[in-house]
């Protein structure tokens, strides 16, 4: 008897890793990669046991098709203002279709009181899943190492600089591949129902230390520039970042600077039996993105 697992946001940073890792699992697993755009999903199509389904979280018909005959879901919603509404719609559809387990990508500090906007959105979704009666596992990762690829690679490549308003804050960055590995175990292993995993990398480092590691690995000088809050806001506005997003990001940077992002947990190793990637290992594996 096979198990069909739907991964939403399958072309994103964590989603594509989940799909890749599920595709090489033993057992009769069918992976349904839920992609927003078929073109972006082309690479996933070639993986063994993976089928692509186009889904738009705002289009009920596409959700109906995506969730049909699905047993389990890895639920990712984007960093969007209406992410709570999107997630609730997905949970409703999962319930209608008899989904047995949801692994939700949440965020560290989701249950902090009063917390920050980003966390409160995630907690609201978590609560909705709890109330749905569907079995669940919540993954609450710290900041992704891959953010350096997605948001800082250009300035590293062109100016040798990492610009961020984080001061001397230490952050227990986690590799998205480790988040995916925990998610895959939660979807295919036993004993993860009702569990909440706070996920971090093996160490907390400042962005100056991250810059030093990137310098060592790439062989080019990379410096961290601590950007004052006003300049950070101005730069975000110039890059078209909406106010709600800039506010949410500035709140997050304040959490970092208050020293609330430096805790290290051993949950990646405990769940997967593998050590999480260090920032140095990440930098080596993604070196080509920075040179
Ligand atoms: N980045 C971090 O450091 C961090 C830390 C902790 C938690 N998180 C959480 O992680 C989640 C994001 O995960 P991620 O970084 O892996 O995602 P991501 O790379 O931003 O990708 C988002 C995915 O969602 C898809 N998507 C966007 N709008 C959609 C829609 N209307 N319908 C269907 N699909 C849609 C995107 O497809 P298209 O690109 O084709 O639109 C993409 O595949 C967020 O909830 C965030 O709060 C992030």
Image (cartoon, rainbow, N blue to C red):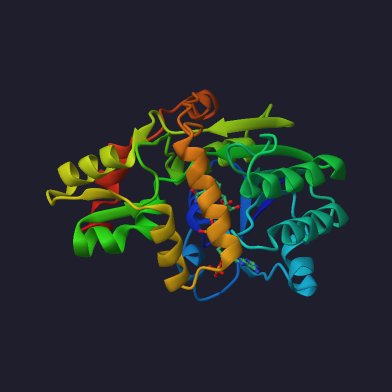
Image-based side of 228 in relation to 290, left or right: right
1 or 64, which is in the foreground? Answer: 64
Relative to 34, does residue 62 appear above or below in the rendering?
below
256 or 36, which is in the foreground? Answer: 256
* Displayed-image quarter of ligand 1: bottom right
- Can you give x and y, in whole percent of width and height, for residue 279 in the image? 32, 38
Q: Quadrant of the C terminus?
A: bottom left
Image-based side of 240 in relation to 187, left or right: left
- Can you give x and y, in whole percent of width and height, for residue 198 in the image? 58, 32
Q: Judge whether residue 197 can be spotted in this image.
A: yes
Relative to 232, does residue 110 appear above or below in the rendering?
above
216 or 117, which is in the foreground? Answer: 117
Q: Quadrant of the N terminus?
A: top right
224 or 195, which is in the foreground? Answer: 224
Q: Judge whether residue 10 can be spotted in this image.
A: no
Give the image quarter of residue 10: bottom right
- Can you give x and y, in whole percent of width and height, for residue 86 in the image? 73, 62
């Amino acid at each position: 008897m096979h198990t069909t697992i739907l991964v939403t946001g399958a072309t994103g940073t964590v989603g594509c890793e989940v799909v890749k890792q599920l595709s090489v699992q033993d057992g009769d697993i069918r992976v349904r990669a839920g992609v927003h755009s078929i073109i972006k999903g082309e690479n996933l199509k070639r993986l063994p046991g993976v089928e692509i389904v186009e889904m738009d979280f705002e289009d009920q018909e596409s959700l109906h098709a995506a969730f049909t005959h699905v047993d389990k879901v890895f639920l990712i919603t984007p960093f969007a203002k209406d992410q709570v509404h999107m997630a609730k719609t997905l949970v409703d559809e999962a319930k209608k279709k008899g989904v047995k387990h949801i692994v939700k990508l949440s965020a560290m500090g989701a249950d902090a009181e009063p917390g920050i906007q980003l966390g409160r959105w995630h907690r609201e979704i978590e609560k909705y899943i709890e109330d749905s009666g569907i079995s669940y596992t919540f993954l609450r990762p710290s900041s992704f190492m891959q953010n350096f690829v997605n948001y800082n690679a250009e300035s590293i490549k062109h100016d040798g600089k990492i610009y961020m308003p984080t001061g001397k804050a230490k952050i227990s960055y986690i590799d998205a591949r480790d988040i995916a590995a925990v998610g895959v175990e939660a979807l295919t292993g036993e004993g993860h129902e009702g569990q909440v995993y706070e996920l971090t990398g093996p160490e907390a480092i400042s962005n100056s230390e991250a810059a030093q590691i990137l310098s060592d690995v790439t062989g080019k000088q990379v410096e961290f520039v601590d950007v004052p809050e006003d300049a950070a806001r101005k730069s975000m506005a110039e890059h078209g970042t909406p106010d709600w997003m800039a506010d949410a990001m500035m709140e997050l940077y304040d959490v970092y600077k208050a020293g609330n992002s430096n805790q290290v947990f051993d949950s990646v190793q405990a769940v997967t039996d593998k050590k999480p990637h260090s920032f140095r290992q990440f930098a080596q594996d993604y070196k080509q993105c920075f040179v």
